[in-house]
Amino acid sequence: MDEKPVQLLDEIRARVAAKPAVLGPDDEILTPGKPKRIDSEYVRCGTSCIFMFTEPLGGWRHVVALKSRKKEDYAVLMREIRNEYFPNAEKIIIVSDNLNIHSKATFYEAFPPKEAFGLSHIFDIHYTPVHGSWLNIAESELSSLSTQCLGDLRIKSVEELNEALRAWESDRNNRQNGVNWQFTTEDARIKLKRLYPTPIFSK
């Protein structure tokens, strides 16, 4: 999982509609089209934080925007992942960066002790290296989201943002887009020797 801050913006003036290309009889482009013009002025409407959860082997992701990025927000989302998407899992492994809210301690701050204890035993949290060179799959999904969904849109509210995110999530999940992970442990020991030293005991 990973997060992405987003600036909420509104238009001051309506965008000028795009002009389509003029095609000839054989679909040859006689006059190229013009992209929709965007006014450089806008209104700031606050900020939001996008949370991305992705399971690459299954081609699944869940993305949601919240008004804040507090410990309670993280705890509630983790409970949602457990109850809504993986209710029968004995263990859920989460890979994330070492942000202060990414901790099992947040469960105890947000929920009663019994519920917090249960969640803390379901989730197994693994942190990415602080100073290492690593590819964050959730971050790659956020990049795809920015390109395919958000683009140059100006979205003024968290509600509107979540509408766009739900549509993108549904389409991407339906197409079962996964990740073809090709960077092996052996490759890591060569390219990231400082972080992956040769084991003392080898087969």
Image: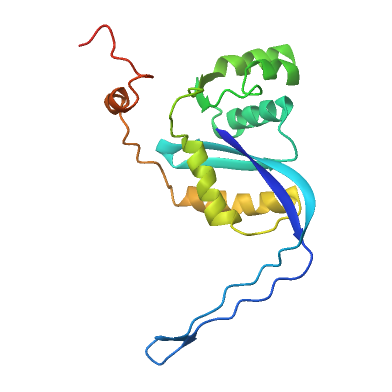
Furthest residue to the left? 203
**Image quadrant occupied by the N terminus:** top right
Q: In which quarter of the image is residue 121?
A: top right
Q: In which quarter of the image is residue 15?
A: bottom right
Q: Is residue 68 left or right of residue 17?
A: right
Image position, residue 138 (x, y; %): 51, 37
Judge whether 62 appears above or below 12 on screen.
above
Residue placed at 32% from the left, 21% from the top?
A: 193
Q: In this view, does 160 lie to the left or right of 58?
A: right
**Image quadrant occupied by the C terminus:** top left
Q: Quadrant of residue 101?
A: top right
Residue placed at 39% from the left, 86% from the top?
A: 28
Judge whether 191 appears above or below 57 on screen.
above
Image position, residue 77 (x, y; %): 65, 31
Q: Can residue 115 be seen in this view?
A: no
Residue placed at 60% from the left, 42% from the top?
A: 63
Judge whether 87 appears above or below 105 on screen.
below
Q: Is residue 33 visible?
A: yes
Depth check: 85 or 11 in front?
11
Furthest residue to the top? 200
Image position, residue 145 (x, y; %): 55, 49
Render colour scheme: rainbow
Q: How many circles with numbers are drawn on the protein?
A: 0
Image position, residue 56 (x, y; %): 43, 37
Judge whether 49 appears above or below 40 on screen.
above
